[in-house]
Amino acid sequence: MAATAASVAQELRQVPEQLPGAARAGGLAPLPLASLPKAAAGGATTPMDLGASWMLQLGKANGARFGARAMSQARTDNAADVEVLPACDAMRAWRRSPARTGRVALVPTMGNLHEGHLELVDEARRQADEVLVSIFVNPSQFAPHEDLDRYPRTFQRDLELLRSRGAAAVFAPTPDDMYPGGSPGGVVVTPSFVEGKNEAACRPFHFSGVATVCLKLFNLCRPDVAIFGQKDAMQCVVISRMLEDLMLDSQVSLVIAPTSRESDGLARSSRNAYLTPGMRSRAPAIYAALTGATQAVGATPGSVRKTVREQLEAVGMEVNYISVADRRDMSEKADGEGLADSVVSVACLLEEDGKQCRLIDNVLIPRTV
Ligand code: AMP
């Protein structure tokens, strides 16, 4: 069932860009470093002292390990072919193969890959012997009014990018493979602890869809380590907590890689493709507002919420929320509390010429500021 990128090229042309779906994740839940399984034993990632430089946005939060960005990109000079696993049976067979003797890292994605995704692959290569990337646009994490149908599907291009970055295999199931009885399925994971909080308040069923598909992926792919991006902060919290509460944390290590940004600070995202030139020119205001407000002398959760809102509204953005939350459970901090050990996240809408794009971003505040 498994095939190489070259050998399936023809086949993929016949099953064009409808193949994938994806997974998301993220999570924070207190785990002592000692309890982190094989990734810690391998020593591939140095735990960051968040107090050293929170601007690096690296660290360990709620038990998740935040990967240190390497000084150089992973090598690209030994790019081999990448195996395509188009269905669950092929995925299971690949994982069970006697050839799989080393550690496997999983990078769950929804495809339409950008440099941010590829940096997760780089981190995965540092964490494991083989990197498996899933590409699946997961229907159960999209609300009916959201962009499931128009979400960009660019499988052939994704495959080439993954090959050049040294991924070993790509798991690209169809929705029917992942949800034989239809989406969302009769049994789902409900991360109730985030209900009503920032991103989960805006997207009430999203994190159940995310957690459920990630659990399915973990069961199918059996990774030793899973790599997620800090870009989706609440996702990180949810996955970490799911691993811990469902007692998978001894089997799957969670590594969270820092947010990858364009040179002007805009967080890379597949949805940046929706930005018109006018929206794109305003978008860097998000990260500028987050960094400016959180670095201001005497900043508090109250001052950060006020300042960020003012700055984003001043450039015509509609703010969904500005959250200054505890990194362990995403509960909002009181206005007058300290900023330490929080995640400051924002979601806002940009509009132009009848087009709309919703962007999210966040920064981590270390334990000591
Ligand atoms: P997605 O394809 O959007 O579901 O994302 C797949 C994974 O890539 C998730 O773990 C995201 O958090 C991560 N990711 C997306 N954008 C970025 C970025 N700019 N920097 C780091 N990770 C990212």
Image (spheres, rainbow, N blue to C red):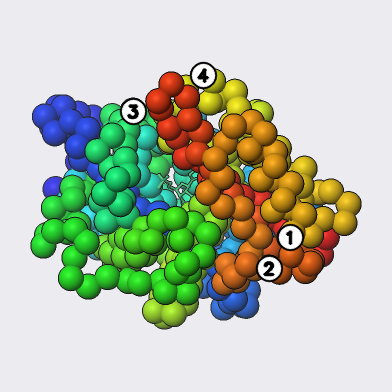
User: Where is mark 1, residue-wise?
Assistant: 301
Residue 203 appears in the picture as rendered: yes
Q: Give the amino acid at mark 3.
A: Arg
Q: Residues within 10 Å of mark 1 (few under 14, many from 20)?
A: many
Measuring 74% from the left and 65% from the top, which residue is drawn there? 335
Q: Are marks 2 and 3 in contact (CB under 8 Å)?
A: no
Q: CA distance from mark 4 to mark 3?
A: 24 Å
Q: Looking at mark 2, is its residue's CB closer than 8 Å to ligand 1?
A: no
Q: Which numbered dot is residue 157?
A: 3
Q: Earlier in the sequence, mark 1 or mark 4?
A: 4
Q: Looking at mark 3, is its residue's CB closer than 8 Å to ligand 1?
A: no
* Nearest to the observer: residue 99 or residue 151: 151
User: Where is mark 2, residue-wise?
Assistant: 333
Q: How far across and how far down the image is residue 168, in percent?
A: 36, 45
Q: Are marks 2 and 1 in contact (CB under 8 Å)?
A: yes
Measuring 32% from the left and 71% from the top, which residue is drawn there? 189
Q: Earlier in the sequence, mark 1 or mark 3?
A: 3
